[in-house]
Image (cartoon, rainbow, N blue to C red):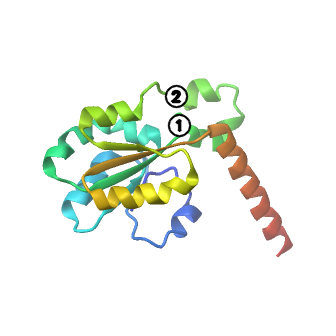
């Protein structure tokens, strides 16, 4: 499994699968290329979880993948781009949207058509695992797009942080 840099360290530590993660300042750059390279060199299914911005930044790498016969699945939580910044210190700045968030007009399905990659849109959480299992079984380059409401996601993460802080304060 490959995960772009938007995951927190505790989230990474909870995964039981093998994990390749690009750390440092380039955590969101060239993640599609990295995934395709891991898939080309490996003998097991390669699954990457990349935010929509990470995916779109390096989407041109998909164009060469079809002819190589690479088996790679990209799970793309699509929240409008750059939403990780809304959970960091700059979230309180009035310039947050103008300077840090990076909304994009790109349609991930259209990018997949251009690259001849399979595309699946998953609207319900219960449909994600079957879609992932199907994508791994079918092989080739597969993209599973999962639309995420950015504001609701931030509210859920804040609630989880509050619960964790409460539990820690009682121990």
Quadrant containing the C terminus in the rendered view: bottom right
Q: Alpha-carbon neighbours of circle 2 within 10 Å: few (<14), some, or many (≥20)?
A: some
| Residue 70 drawn above or below residue 99 | below
Q: Residue at x 29, y 34 (%)?
A: 113
- In the structure shown, which secondary structural element does the residue marked by tag 2 occupy? loop
For residue 103, which numbered disc appears in the image? 2
Pick whichever, 54 or 46, lies toward us: 46
| Residue 17 drawn above or below residue 74 | below
Tag count in the figure?
2
Pick whichever, 85 or 145, lies toward us: 145
For residue 9, which numbered disc appears in the image? none
Any part of residue 2 in sight: no
The outermost residue toward the right is 170
How many angstroms separate mark 1 from mark 2 (CA)?
7 Å
Q: Earlier in the sequence, mark 1 or mark 2?
A: 1
Q: Residue at x 44, y 51 (%)?
A: 4
Quadrant containing the N terminus in the rendered view: bottom left
| Residue 164 drawn above or below residue 59 | below
Locate residue 70, reporting x and y percent.
21, 54
- In the structure shown, which secondary structural element does the residue marked by tag 1 occupy? loop
Any part of residue 129 in sight: yes
The outermost residue toward the bottom is 171
Q: Residue at x 39, y 41 (%)?
A: 55
Q: Alpha-carbon neighbours of circle 1 within 10 Å: few (<14), some, or many (≥20)?
A: some
Mark 1–mark 2 contact, CB under 8 Å? yes
Identify the residue under disc 1.
82
Locate residue 84, reporting x and y percent.
57, 43
Locate residue 152, reporting x and y percent.
68, 42
């Amino acid at each position: 499994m490959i995960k772009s840099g938007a995951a927190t360290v505790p989230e990474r530590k909870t995964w039981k699968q093998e994990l390749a993660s690009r750390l440092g300042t380039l955590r969101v750059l060239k993640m599609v290329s990295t995934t395709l390279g891991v898939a080309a060199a490996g003998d097991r299914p390669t699954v990457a979880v990349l935010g929509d911005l990470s995916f779109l930044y390096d989407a041109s790498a998909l164009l060469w993948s079809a002819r190589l016969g690479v088996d790679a699945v990209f799970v793309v939580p699509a929240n409008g781009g750059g939403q990780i910044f809304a959970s960091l210190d700059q979230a309180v700045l009035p310039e947050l949207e103008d300077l840090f968030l990076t909304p994009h007009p790109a349609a991930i399905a259209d990018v997949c058509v251009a690259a001849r990659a399979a595309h699946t849109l998953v609207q319900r959480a219960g449909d994600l695992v079957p879609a992932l299992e199907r994508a791994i079984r079918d092989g080739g380059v597969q993209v599973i797009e999962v639309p995420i409401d950015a504001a609701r996601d931030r509210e859920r993460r804040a609630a989880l942080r509050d619960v964790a802080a409460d539990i820690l304060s009682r121990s």
